[in-house]
Image (tube, helix red, strand yellow):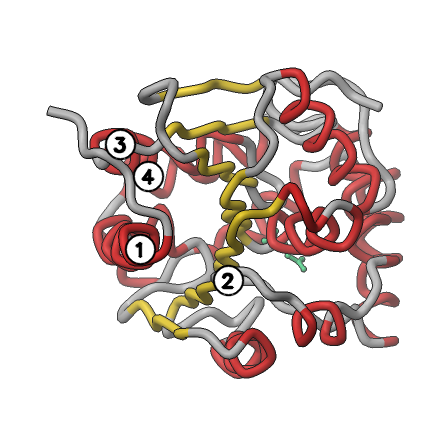
Amino acid sequence: MADLAHAVHGPRDGPVVLLVHGFPFDRGMWRFQVGPLTQAGYRVVVPDLAGFGGTEGSFTTVEEAALDLLQLLQRLRIPKAVVVGFSMGGYVAQALAAVSPKSVAGLALVDTRAEADSPEGKAKREATIASVQQNGTRALAMAMIANQLTEGTRDSERLLTAEVRTMMLKQSKPGVLGALAAMRDRPDRRDLLKGLQVPALVVVGEKDGVTPPAAAQVMADLLRCELVTIPGAAHLSPMERPDEVNEALLGWLKATLPAAAQS
Ligand code: MLT
């Protein structure tokens, strides 16, 4: 088990929102969400999963990462949180709902999917693992940037693009290798989502090529919940189109778990 580095923002008595980052990122990817959510009265917990950001070690199954989150919630004496998971963070959020449904007050799945990796997907993970073992994480990070932000954003928002690239480049090799194995081996969660009885939301970038809108539709159908498509966003919608993502999250949060807004 890993002791997760984390930050807690917002009022102590606000409903808790747990933001779970994607791959190969850390809690920095949520920086545009933290302010608006705390101002709306939510207590926001943002961890770094094992091997990412300020947390050492690694995790090799999504359940292990979910148990790390559970331990963090217990340490913070938080019995229940609304869990918002982006991409790999969405796989971990679904694992948390599987291992400890009572800890999940609501589930927002952002640019992620319910299905396991296909055989081709698993073979691609294997190739990526071999390449990272041999050459380190740099080539992977450099190759991944094109999927995170649209070409227009990469051309016009150089600072944001550099920030995203830097975040990907700084993640540890053991963290990256462990997470790749965890994503390769994660189970299909369609039955889980079908049976979940919590408020849910699905958000996807219109141009997400990693976890495309069709995968988001599958989750929304299973969860019987709203699907919000973010115009002009690729995979990393919380950073590429933060205002639209915040509007979707806050609209849903206020309807399902109201908080007293902060002045
Ligand atoms: C992520 O964005 O967290 C991952 O790239 C998702 C994946 O590879 O399945």
Say whether residue 66 is visible.
yes
Marks 3,4: beta carbons within 8 A: no
Q: Helix or strand or loop: what does disc 4 sit on?
A: helix
Amino acid under disc 4: Gln
Which sits earlier in the primary sequence, circle 3 or circle 2? Answer: 3
- In which quadrant of the rendered view does residue 39 lie? top left
The dot on residue 245 is 1
In this view of the protein, which residue sits in the foreground, 93 or 77? 77
Q: Position of residue 262 (x, y in %)?
A: 17, 27
Which residue is labeled 2 in the image? Answer: 111
Residue drawn at the location 28% of the way across and 30% of the way down = 38
In this view of the protein, which residue sits in the foreground, 221 or 31? 221
Ligand 1 located in image quadrant:
bottom right
Comparing labels 3 and 4, the label whose residue is closer to the camera: 3
The dot on residue 41 is 3
Say whether residue 147 is visible.
no
**Label 2, label 4: how many angstroms apart (C-alpha)?**
15 Å
Comparing labels 1 and 3, the label whose residue is closer to the camera: 3
Which residue is labeled 4 in the image? Answer: 33
Answer yes or no: disc 2 within 8 Å of ligand 1. yes
**Label 1, label 2: how many angstroms apart (C-alpha)?**
11 Å
Q: Position of residue 30 (x, y in %)?
A: 41, 37
Residue drawn at the location 77% of the way across and 34% of the way down = 136
